[in-house]
Amino acid sequence: MDHRNHVQAVQECLRFCRDSFTCIPRTVIQLGTGLGDFVERIKVEHLVPYRDIPHFPQSTVESHQGNLIIGCLEGQTVAVLQGRFHFYEGYSTKEVAFPIRVLSLLGARTLILTNAAGGLNPLFFPGSIMVIRDHLNFLGENPLRGPNVDAWGPRFPDLSQAYHPRLIKTALNCASHCGLKNVVTGTYACIPGPSLETPAETRWLRDCGADAVGMSSIPEVIVARHAGMEVLGLSAISNINNPDDFQPITLEDIIETAGRIGPQIADLITAVITDKDISTE
Ligand code: HPA
């Protein structure tokens, strides 16, 4: 999609959202693998399949449902993206981040995202929850490439604190209040996929400083920061990749482990949303 069509698509989608929704979400929660049940915690005001939203991409991955839900969680109006789009599905990073662009223009100020990731840090284990401190973008593409829309954000957005320090602190405090002993912090690396990493690539990613690797989220984070949103990222560590003893990685294992820690991540998100530091904004 060229620049002019992209801007027009965003504006048309924004108009649809303004006309359809009776409340403005302040927080966007983007659900990754294993978090499908999270919506049971939401008092749903609107549930719109992605296919009914003008210009929304369509999820082609079976483990991702495709609904935008607007509703109430612990007294807060939230938008829940049930399912995301990936670069490996053939979408550009601009398309991947399209929902975040639209929701930021609608008035959302915070993005909480979750994903499943392979653990690279030898201290992690399958079932760890990683609060993302920083990222490495190995997609070879940036959603802000091309003409900048100055009304949407600056040409050169600062990413020195891509993941908001206050939200990281809140998440760690909430984890300890929730009694979660499996919460760690680290750097998330995004690869294009869909093939998984070789042992040599795994060694290299570790040497680059990555603690976990996945195939998502970074385009959305870049667009959210461009739009001035604050970001919290949570990775469900579904497998551990050890270059010296590399085990095959299967989608079934990823889904099983991510599903097992999904309820803990859901508790953590609910606690973060309830925390006065974010709810008073
Ligand atoms: N690599 C890339 N993406 C992933 C992995 C992995 O090991 N596990 C879950 N998503």
Image (cartoon, grey):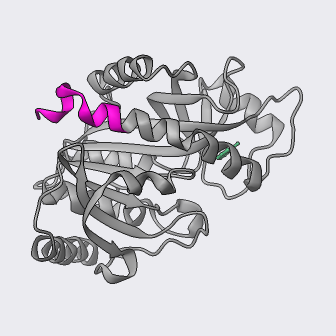
Instruction: Give the magenta part as a residue range.
Output: 270-281
Rendered-image quarter of ligand 1: top right
Task: Decide: is 66 above or below 32.
Answer: below
41 left or right, relative to 34: left
Position of the N terminus, as image quadrant, is: bottom left
Position of the C terminus, as image quadrant, is: top left
Query: In this orientation, which residue lies closer to the viewer: 38 or 143?
Result: 38
168 left or right, relative to 130: left
| Residue 160 position by quadrant | top left
| Residue 214 position by quadrant | top right
Identify the residue at image location x=53%, y=23%.
183
Residue 77 highlighted magenta (yes or no): no
Query: In this orientation, which residue lies closer to the viewer: 19 or 196?
Result: 19
Residue 24 visible somewhere in the drawing: yes
Instruction: Indicate the position of residue 269 as horizontal and vertical percent values.
Output: 37, 37
Residue 147 visible somewhere in the drawing: no
Identify the residue at image location x=20%, y=54%.
104
| Residue 161 position by quadrant | top left
Identify the residue at image location x=79%, y=52%.
250
Task: Decide: is 5 above or below 229.
Answer: below
Task: Decide: is 91 above or below 129.
Answer: below
